[in-house]
């Protein structure tokens, strides 16, 4: 039993050297992975910023079109009201498209 323990202790330096080289390999792999994660993070951020800008443009255009449609609807309602008043005079009201 004591001999087995001694043999295990004698193997420690060799096993330690093996671990050291593995850890050094892991260190470089972790560094490469960290670099890739940082690059991916930047690409995702840039993509979201571009998408946000594009959505902002669509929102602005939609709001502009809504204002135009609202103004058109108000104008048509006013025209229809004017047409109701002209019925008393015998004129035909303007036709809606």
Image (tube, rainbow, N blue to C red):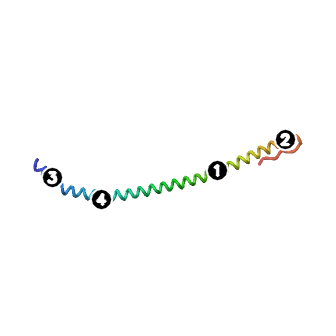
Dot label at residue 25 = 4
Left or right of 59 on screen, residue 17: left
Q: What element carries label 1?
A: helix
Q: Mark 2 points at which residue?
A: 85
Label 4 close to label 3 by CB (< 8 Å):
no
Q: Which of marks 3 and 2 is nearer the N terminus?
A: 3
Image quadrant in which you'd find residue 13: bottom left
N-term mark: 1 or 3: 3
- In the figure, is residue 56 to the left or right of 13? right
Q: Is mark 3 on a helix, strand or loop?
A: helix
- Report whether 33 appears left or right of 65: left
Query: Nearest the camera: 25 or 93?
Result: 25
| Residue 9: assigned label | 3
**Which residue sits at x=31%, y=57%?**
27
Q: In this view, does 56 lie to the left or right of 85?
A: left
Disc 3 from disc 2: Cα separation: 110 Å
Q: Nearer the viewer, residue 64 or 93?
A: 64
* N-term mark: 4 or 3: 3
Q: Which residue is drawn at 63% across and 51% down?
A: 60
Could you say which quadrant of the image residue 89 lies in?
top right
The percent position of residue 52, horizontal first and vertical second, equals 55, 52
Labelled disc at residue 62: 1
Mark 2 vs 4: CB contact within 8 A = no
Secondary structure beneath dot 2 equals: helix
């Amino acid at each position: 039993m004591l001999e087995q323990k001694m043999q295990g202790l004698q193997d420690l330096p060799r096993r330690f050297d093996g671990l050291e080289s593995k850890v050094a390999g892991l260190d470089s792999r972790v560094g490469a992975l960290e670099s890739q994660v940082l690059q991916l993070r930047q690409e995702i951020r840039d993509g979201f910023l571009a998408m946000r800008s594009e959505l902002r443009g669509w929102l602005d255009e939609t709001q502009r079109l809504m204002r135009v449609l609202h103004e058109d609807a108000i104008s048509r309602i006013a025209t229809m009201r004017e047409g109701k008043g002209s019925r008393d005079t015998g004129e035909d009201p303007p036709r809606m498209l």
